[in-house]
């Protein structure tokens, strides 16, 4: 569908008059999406965005808000901007629940969530002393997105659970560092004494 010069001018005029909303200046691309001239993303939905050779997976949180998901480098982020989302060059595809589940489980395993770990749940309600299995369960059908491990929440709407390291293991590591430091200091002292003895012998 083509537009005359006058129609284009009117579109930009309308955009300029409505771009500022609640302290946020909405992009021209978002405006065009609202007009039905570009596909409009739905808040809370997961999308794959392809811009040239880069791919991003995110849960869209709305214009002017940071979205969460995987950056073009495959790294998890809770501060993905809307530059890609509003790019007219960006190819956008809504993800299926199965694709979201696969991506989140892979990220959970990368973070170290597995049988035997101690963690504070994503809901931040309680601490689980020991995960008893490696069974993941995905629930993304009621608007919220949750990923469970052994029935405990490891992911909830952009927030991950926190793995708690074994205090005893931390203590051992600390003792090892202190022993290594003492050994180094002892070696330096012995070397210094040896140098002093050599001076006296001369």
Image (cartoon, grey):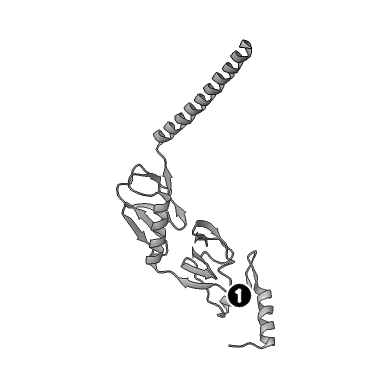
8 versus 142 height, above or below: below
Residue, far top:
201
111 versus 85 height, above or below: above
Q: Is residue 188 left or right of residue 97?
A: right
Q: Residue placed at 41% from the left, 64% from the top?
A: 100
25 versus 7 height, above or below: above
Q: In the rendered image, which quarter is residue 30 located in?
A: bottom right
**In the image, residue 182 lies at what x, y percent?**
51, 24
Q: In the rendered image, which quarter is residue 66 located in?
A: bottom right
**In the image, residue 72 lies at what x, y percent?**
52, 62
**In the image, residue 194 lies at what x, y percent?**
57, 17
Q: Is residue 102 visible?
A: yes
Q: Residue placed at 51% from the left, 71% from the top?
A: 41
The front one of 151 and 106 is 106
Quadrant of the image containing the C terminus:
top right
Q: Residue placed at 35% from the left, 49% from the top?
A: 114
Number of callouts: 1
Sort mark 1 into few (<14), some (14-19) or many (20+) by Cα contacts within 10 Å.
Answer: many
Q: Is residue 128 left or right of residue 45?
A: left
The front one of 166 and 128 is 166
Which element type, helix, strand or loop, lies under badge 1?
Answer: helix
Residue at numbered disc 1: 31
Q: Is residue 126 visible?
A: no
Residue, far front:
202
Quadrant of the image containing the N terminus:
bottom right
């Amino acid at each position: 569908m083509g537009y005359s010069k006058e129609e284009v001018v009117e579109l930009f005029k309308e955009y300029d008059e409505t771009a500022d909303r609640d302290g946020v200046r909405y992009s021209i691309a978002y405006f065009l999406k609202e007009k039905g001239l570009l596909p409009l993303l739905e808040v809370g939905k997961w999308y794959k965005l392809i811009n040239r050779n880069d791919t991003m997976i995110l849960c869209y949180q709305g214009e002017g808000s940071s979205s969460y998901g995987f950056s073009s480098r495959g790294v998890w982020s809770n501060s993905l901007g809307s530059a890609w989302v509003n790019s007219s060059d960006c190819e956008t595809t809504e993800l299926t629940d199965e694709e979201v589940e696969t991506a989140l489980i892979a990220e959970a395993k990368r973070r170290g969530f597995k049988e035997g770990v101690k963690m504070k749940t994503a809901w931040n309600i309680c601490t689980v002393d020991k995960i008893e299995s490696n069974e993941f369960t995905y629930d993304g059908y009621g608007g919220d997105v949750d990923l469970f491990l052994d029935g405990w929440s490891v992911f909830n709407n952009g927030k991950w659970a926190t793995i708690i390291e074994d205090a005893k293991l931390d203590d051992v590591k600390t003792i090892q560092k202190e022993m290594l430091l003492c050994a180094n200091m002892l070696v330096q002292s012995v070397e210094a004494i040896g140098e002093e003895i050599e001076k006296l012998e001369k």
